[in-house]
């Protein structure tokens, strides 16, 4: 028999409208800032928390550690700059992991791939052996990491092996590779970046070098003014041509927030943080992290490649039927992930002042995944932004730093980090169940 | 339904129509099997411009397989496809798109996490200076939606996952007609929809026909079929048992073809 028509239940229009309203991002329908805030609050009440967990996490970390750290040292200039430096590694690794998480894949090898990048960089600049110029060492380290990404990505996409297994194998392999590379040369497994040759010092200064305070102010003002102006021009142009644009108040609010963050960071960094003598200025690592954040944000939000990454993460079959070449986009995402991990590894080496077999790639990858997910990247693919990894990295950095200040032993660090990862994943799963959509591929 | 005749009389073959009497797409003696299952055998089908052809058939009759053969997802084992009178080989969805064939699949091929504009331009993004030209894409998408009178969405920038079934279907159809398409295939576009949403999609189908497109609609629902179809074709166990003007059918006759492949002497 041909199918008989099923009688329709009378639809409840008010309920439907309400649900639809909650699922539409407020910035695209609100006309005023007040409307936006009301819609945003309604979404949060309905369980779509957005960036709220990160902001709340940062606030809790700040209040708790400031209250219980010895001599309330958490908010001191010295500690805050240190926190930014520690977080930088987690932020970069989380941004790396974000690319594969967006596809609904995972890369468990980022920690040791980062370490491979770090150790290659450190080894190549050693004056006692290879004596490569710092920039060549950086290029070689990043290239090696990109090749690792290409190899793992090819296995995953062409042979259709699960990314979980391939990168778990990578985790072990590159742990071994790091140990082998460390033993090369006459350094007893501890090649160092400390020393008075200026070439080697460049790598040390990635993390520890500071920008002249005045230059820091000027640089920050140029960046904030440039980004603010671009945002303002884009939003007003779109509003004028009748395209979807956030309310004027929201655009202004974003610019003001950006300025406040910029001013605060530079002001804190420019306070003398040395006990004896003077150490002041923005560490180089901050503009480096900002550059990674900016470049990858443009790639994900403003190019076809980025659009395809989101499409594949959201609905691979739709992407395939649209004519997107899934295998090559996926492989490139793994390349970018490992390449970015290499940047994180060089920063890590710089932070440690060299490399040794103390590097714990297992912990690094867990922090990276945790940071990305805490920031709002979904483990199920298709949802998340580069910014989320950066914010999540800051949360992880804050926990790491605070527990260090409290003098807690490493076993407590492991347990707390594990719990934080677990809660982030729970929030992710719950928000996915609550609302089918979330923060999407919008800027 | 007398509607069908009225609608047919109002159909306007467009300027670029092929020579009189020749359908825009002709399927000839098409065969397709999966292992031992002969999904299609010796199928003929004509899809003329400016007309809606309804493809009917019971579950498993081969409607989706036929659609996918035309859309380049499956390759037929036997037979021929003629596009505007010339034999063509459609080996991929890209080939189909090049000819001007667009398909709206049963399981909607939309990414829930992308918004309406992003979905409509997926894999055909407009670029400026190497970067996505969001303004141009949004303007064109809005124009297409307005011209098809798809006006119930709250914002063209809302994620597709937040749309109702009818709205999603409308977006999928609008996406299909954005690209100067000449033939649109819709696989069960109303299967999951309520009454109001079904009407919305059927109105949309009529507008495609009025633009001079060739349209093929697969449906189980005879109400829908008689509401929009100018022609009706019936598949039964992978064979085309009849195709004719909609006015030549009544409900009972279509049901008989669908369930037994013939009229059993009563029609
Ligand atoms: N990819 C496939 N592999 C094997 N058999 C298939 C495949 N797709 C369809 N078939 C078979 O072909 C026949 C027709 O299916 P289909 O075209 O989906 O029916 P419908 O008319 O309901 O759309 C069915 O017997 C189905 O099992
Ligand atoms: Mg079907």
Image (cartoon, coloured by chain):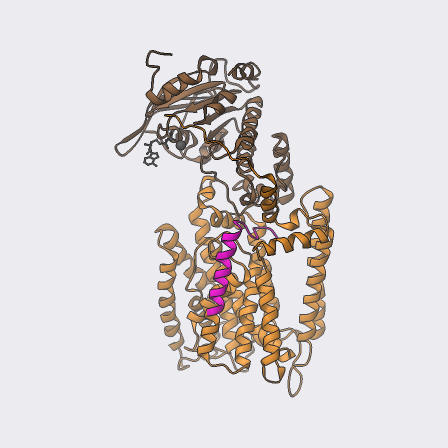
Q: Quadrant of residue B89?
A: top left
Q: Nearer the viewer, residue A309 or B66?
A: B66
Res. A260 visible in picture: yes
Q: Nearer the viewer, residue A290 or A186?
A: A290
Rendering coords of residue A269 (x, y %): 66, 75
Rendering coords of residue B222 (x, y %): 45, 23
**Who's the residue at 48% across and 73% down the image?**
A416
Rendering coords of residue A331 (x, y %): 43, 53
Q: Quadrant of residue A410?
A: bottom left
Q: Is residue A29 left or right of residue B78?
A: right
Q: Is residue A314 left or right of residue B63?
A: right
Quarter of the picture holding the C terminus of chain B: top left
Q: Quadrant of residue A334?
A: bottom left
Question: Which segment is the magenta one?
Answer: A419-443
Kindly indicate which chain is depicted in orange in the rendered structure: A
Residue A418 sits inside the magenta stretch: no
Please identify the residue farthest to the bottom as the structure is shown.
Answer: A276
């Amino acid at each position: 028999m041909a199918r008989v028509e099923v009688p329709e239940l009378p639809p409840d229009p008010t309920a439907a409208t309400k649900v639809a309203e909650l699922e539409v991002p407020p910035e695209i329908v609100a006309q005023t800032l007040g409307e936006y805030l009301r819609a945003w609050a309604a979404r949060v009440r309905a369980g779509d928390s957005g960036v709220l967990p990160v902001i709340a996490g940062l606030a809790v970390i700040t209040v708790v550690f400031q209250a219980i750290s010895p001599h309330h040292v958490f908010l001191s200039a010295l500690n805050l700059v240190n926190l930014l430096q520690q977080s930088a590694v987690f932020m970069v690794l989380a941004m790396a992991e974000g690319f594969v998480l967006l596809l609904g894949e995972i890369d468990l090898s980022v920690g040791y791939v980062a370490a491979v990048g770090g150790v290659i960089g450190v080894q190549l600049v050693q004056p006692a052996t290879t004596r490569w110029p710092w920039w060549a060492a950086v290029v070689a380290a990043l290239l090696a990491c990109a090749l690792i990404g290409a190899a793992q990505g090819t296995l995953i996409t062409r042979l259709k092996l699960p990314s979980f297994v391939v990168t778990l194998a990578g985790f072990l392999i590159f742990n071994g590779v790091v140990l082998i590379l460390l033993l090369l040369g006459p350094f007893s497994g501890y090649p160092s970046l400390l020393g008075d040759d200026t070439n080697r010092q460049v790598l040390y200064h990635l993390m520890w070098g500071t920008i002249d305070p005045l230059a820091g102010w000027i640089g920050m003002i140029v960046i904030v003014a440039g980004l603010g102006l671009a945002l303002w021009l884009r939003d007003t142009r779109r509003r004028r041509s009748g395209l979807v644009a956030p309310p004027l108040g929201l655009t202004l609010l974003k610019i003001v927030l950006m300025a406040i963050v910029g001013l605060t960071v530079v002001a804190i960094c420019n306070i003398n943080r040395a006990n004896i003598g003077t150490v002041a200025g923005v560490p180089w690592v901050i503009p480096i992290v900002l550059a990674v954040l900016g470049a990858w944000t443009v790639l994900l939000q403003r190019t076809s490649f980025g659009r395809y990454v989101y499409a594949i993460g959201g609905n691979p079959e739709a992407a395939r039927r649209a004519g997107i070449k899934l295998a090559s986009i996926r492989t490139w995402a793994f390349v970018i992930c490992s390449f970015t991990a290499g940047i994180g590894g060089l920063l890590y080496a710089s932070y440690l002042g060299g490399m040794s077999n103390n590097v714990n790639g297992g912990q690094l990858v867990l922090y990276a995944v945790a940071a990305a997910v805490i920031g709002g990247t979904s483990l199920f693919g298709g949802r998340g932004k580069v910014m989320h990894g950066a914010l999540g990295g800051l949360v992880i950095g804050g926990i790491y730093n605070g527990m260090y200040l409290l003098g807690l032993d490493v076993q407590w660090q492991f347990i707390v980090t594990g719990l934080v990862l677990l809660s982030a994943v729970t929030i992710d799963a719950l928000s996915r169940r609550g609302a089918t959509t979330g923060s999407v591929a919008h800027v | 339904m007398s509607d069908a005749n009225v609608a047919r009389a109002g159909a306007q073959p467009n300027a670029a129509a092929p020579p009189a009497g020749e359908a825009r797409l002709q399927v000839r003696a098409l065969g397709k099997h999966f292992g031992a299952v002969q999904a299609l055998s010796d199928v003929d089908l004509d899809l003329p411009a400016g007309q809606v052809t309804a493809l009917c058939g019971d579950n498993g009759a081969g409607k989706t397989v036929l659609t996918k053969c035309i859309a380049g997802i499956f390759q037929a084992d036997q037979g021929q496809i003629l596009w505007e009178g010339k034999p063509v080989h459609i080996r991929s969805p890209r080939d189909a798109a090049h000819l001007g064939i667009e398909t709206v699949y049963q399981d909607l091929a939309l990414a829930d996490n992308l918004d309406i504009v992003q979905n409509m331009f997926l894999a055909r993004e407009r670029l400026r200076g190497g970067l996505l030209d969001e303004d141009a894409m949004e303007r064109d998408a809005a124009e297409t939606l307005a011209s098809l009178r798809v006006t119930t969405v709250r914002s063209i920038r809302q994620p597709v996952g937040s749309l109702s079934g009818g709205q999603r279907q409308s977006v999928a159809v609008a996406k299909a007609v954005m690209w100067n398409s000449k033939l649109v295939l819709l696989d069960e576009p109303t299967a999951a929809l309520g009454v109001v949403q079904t009407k919305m999609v059927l109105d949309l189908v009529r507008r495609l026909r009025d633009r001079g497109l060739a349209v093929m609609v697969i449906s189980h629902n005879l109400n829908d079929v008689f509401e929009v179809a100018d022609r009706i074709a019936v598949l039964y166990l992978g064979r085309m048992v009849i195709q004719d003007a909609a006015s030549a059918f009544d409900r009972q006759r279509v049901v008989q073809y669908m369930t037994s492949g013939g009229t059993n002497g009563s029609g």
